[in-house]
Amino acid sequence: MSLEEAQILRERAKAFLKNAESLFKEGVYDLAAFNVEQYCQLMLKYKLLVKTGTYPRTHSIIRLVRELSKIDEKAGQLLRDMIMVTKIEDAYIGSRYLPRRYEKEEVEAMLKYAKEVFEVVTNEL
């Protein structure tokens, strides 16, 4: 594991969250949803890299959480709201490849989850 690589993942994740908040305020909900997903994905990869020296090459937030749960059971708390986690995970494909529009309320809920649940739990790991 490269400490520099881990730090880059963490910094990039934080930048994605900040960008998601900015895009949300501008009403660009599709890209805000994508940025929330990227934040969650990169934070999980950062935590796995720090704790294990590697991470699976996947975009699946659910898989990353399950991998992290093998090392720290607190990570399993992230899956308590499986519907929200699935919605965030789906934003990767939905905002990039599908002709789908995200609504303000659903992106607002994604952001709330990312900041109030996801960020708190990952900071404890």
Image: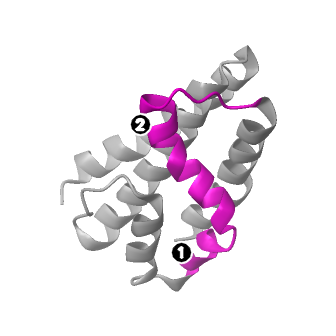
| Amino acid, disc 1 | Ala
**Where, by quadrant of the figure, is residue 21 drawn?**
top right
Q: Residues within 10 Å of mark 2 (few under 14, many from 20)?
A: some
| Amino acid, disc 2 | Arg
Disc 2 or disc 1, which is closer to the eye?
Answer: 1
**Where, by quadrant of the figure, is residue 111 drawn?**
top right
Give yes or no for residue 101 being in the magenta stretch: yes
**Mark 2: which secondary structure?**
helix
Q: 113 and 7: which one is in front?
A: 113
Side of 14 where 106 appears, left or right? right
**Mark 1: which secondary structure?**
helix
Position in image of residue 2 (x %, y %): 19, 54
Q: Residue at x 78, y 30 (%)?
A: 104
What secondary structure is the magenta-colored segment mainly? helix
Q: Residue at x 63, y 75 (%)?
A: 77
Q: Residue at x 62, y 66 (%)?
A: 121
Give the mark nearest the N terminus, 2 or 1: 2
Find disc 2 in the rendering and name its residue. Answer: 12
Task: Specify the farthest residue to the front.
Answer: 99
Position in image of residue 19 (x %, y %): 57, 26
Side of 123 where 58 appears, left or right? left
Find disc 1 in the rendering and name its residue. Answer: 75
- Tell me the quadrant of the picture where the N terminus can be found: bottom left
How is this picture coloured? one colour
